[in-house]
Image (cartoon, grey):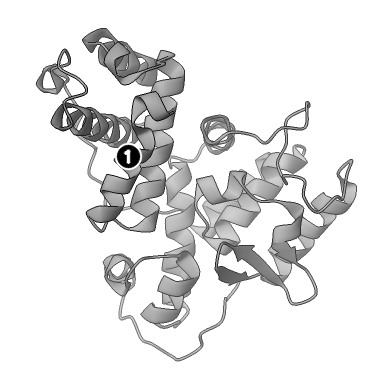
Amino acid sequence: MNSLYFFDFIENLREQKKSKNTILCYSSDVKDFISTSRIISADNIKQTHLDNYKVFLENRKIVPKTIARKLRSVISYINFLKGQGKLENVTVSKIDVPKAISSDKNFITKAEFEKILNKSRENKKIYTALAILYYTGILLSELTNLKNIDFDFDLRFLIIGTRKVPLSDRVYFIAKDFILESKSEKKEFYLFRTAHGTKIIDRNMRTYLSRAIKNAGVSATVNDIRNSFIINQLKAGNSVKFVSKVAGHSSTQSTKKYLKYVKNYEDKGINRIIEI
């Protein structure tokens, strides 16, 4: 990655005071571009790489707003390289970034989630992943990096970096059963592994979950699952500060954006995860 100045790019984002979640998205998107395009060094990047990547995303039938986000992440990376004098032969203005389709609904209802979950019941891995996302609100990148050791079943917490996410009854039992039924209970093992024992990468996990949503006949994205958690906890009367902390937002301003989905919001001072 050194010859790609990837870590320099990430450090530049930190210097710009980008939120942790934003940096995680940029990181995941740029890694996807580099891996898909088989780029080995910054000066190896060509205009065709960007053009082909856009076609690749469209062929995966990803929703326009996700394609737009991924392309903007890559464009930011390329602009960074150009600004550092590492790249000259790519004209990002030639790329037509699709406009994200505006929607008032960026979440899934309880009924929709149950429909998705029921359709995935036979696949314990996807069933568990969906439940963890919906009932903890963690990011997809955090989901794929989960290890058995991250679950404190005695205190009913999920440890994500420096934050503790409380586990509601349903996800507590689903996650615990999944670990007990897996081939290995070793604490250092990734929770979601391939047949070869390696962790499932973000891109593949997103594909699996998107397929599960589509198979259930629900019009939504994987990101909508996290949005639903945040909205549900605000609807339950949790404080913005509490929800912001649990969701890993860099500030309460990020959390307040979800209040538009909560009619007559009231902080009831509950400050505990409510299972909805």
Q: Image check: 120 left or right of 87?
A: right
Q: Nearer the viewer, residue 182 or 224?
A: 182
Q: Which residue appears at 39% of the width and 65% of the height?
A: 249
Kindly give the residue lying farthest to the bottom in the view shown.
269
Name the side, left or right, on which 132 lies relative to 241. Answer: right
Left or right relative to 192: residue 54: left
Which quadrant of the rendered structure holds the N terminus?
top left
Number of residue marks: 1
- Can residue 66 be seen by looking at this rendering? yes
Q: Quadrant of residue 121?
A: top right
Nearer to me, 40 or 127: 40
The answer to whether residue 34 is above or below residue 66 is: above
Q: Position of residue 36 (x, y in %)?
A: 44, 18
Say which of 244 and 235 sits in front.
Answer: 244
At 25% from the left and 59% from the top, the residue drawn is: 17
Compared with 38, 16 (above or below) is below
Instruction: Place residue 81 in its image quadrant.
Output: top left
Q: Which residue is mark 1?
A: 8
User: What x and y, as percent, mark residue 156?
Assistant: 72, 73
Quadrant for the C terminus in the image: bottom right
Residue at x-position 78% and y-position 69%:
153
Above/below status of 158 relative to 236:
above
**Residue type highlighted by circle 1:** Asp
